[in-house]
Amino acid sequence: MDIRNCVKCGKIYNYINGIPMCPTCKSHLEDQFQVTKKYIRDNPSATIVQISEECEVPIKLIHQWIREERLIFSKDSQIGIECEICGSSIRTGRFCDVCKHDLHNNLDDALKKQTFVEELSKRREENKMWYLDRK
Ligand SMILES: [Zn+2]
Ligand SMILES: [Zn+2]
């Protein structure tokens, strides 16, 4: 048996898998997720701030659900998060299609992938600086 403290309420419980959270908190989180999902479906043009306020869910959590590809927005929605590599706006997941394609083509092992991601984010920083200079 794997006994842990819930990250949310601190209660000791029997850990199974995933995030270390007790069943009570986990089901509460799942409720919040369902509420959020329904709200997005009913209000396709809502912004993240709106969703966060209406559903009483932290923005960070909404971002996390988007990264996990659990929340997907319609094409008309203004909502997007940044690609972790180039920063362009995406609707779900971690990377935009271009970076995903690059990652897929260049790499097979995880270590190389990590280096590549770092390299690309560095390049992105440099681009940003260049852009600021020009302004
Ligand atoms: Zn808990
Ligand atoms: Zn990208």
Image (tube, grey):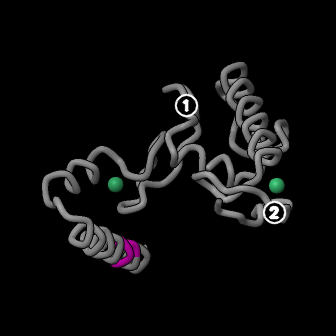
Residue drawn at x 16%, y 61% is 107
Q: Where does ligand 1 appear, by image quarter?
A: bottom right
User: Mark 2 is on which residue type?
Assistant: Ile
Residue 39, position as x, y percentages in the image? 74, 26
* Measured Cα–Cα span from mark 1 to mark 2: 36 Å
Rendered position, 129 above or below 57: below
Q: Main secondary structure of the magenta part?
A: helix
User: Mark 1 is on which residue type?
Assistant: Phe
Residue furthest top in the image = 42
The mark nearer the N terminus, 1 or 2, is 2
**Quarter in which the N terminus is drawn:** bottom right
| Chain part drawn in magenta | 124-128
Side (left or right) of 135 relative to 11: left
Answer few, some or many: residues within 10 Å of disc 1's Cα (few below 14, many 20 plus, some between 14 and 19): some
Side (left or right) of 22 relative to 70: right
User: In the drawing, what numbered circle is on residue 12?
Assistant: 2
Viewer-side label of 1, 2: 2
Q: Secondary structure at mark 1?
A: loop
Count the marks.
2
Rendered position, 59 above or below 31: below
Residue 4, position as x, y percentages in the image? 72, 65
Q: Secondary structure at mark 2?
A: strand
Verify whether residue 58 appears in magenta.
no
Which of the 4 image quarters holds residue 20?
bottom right
| Residue marked by disc 1 | 73
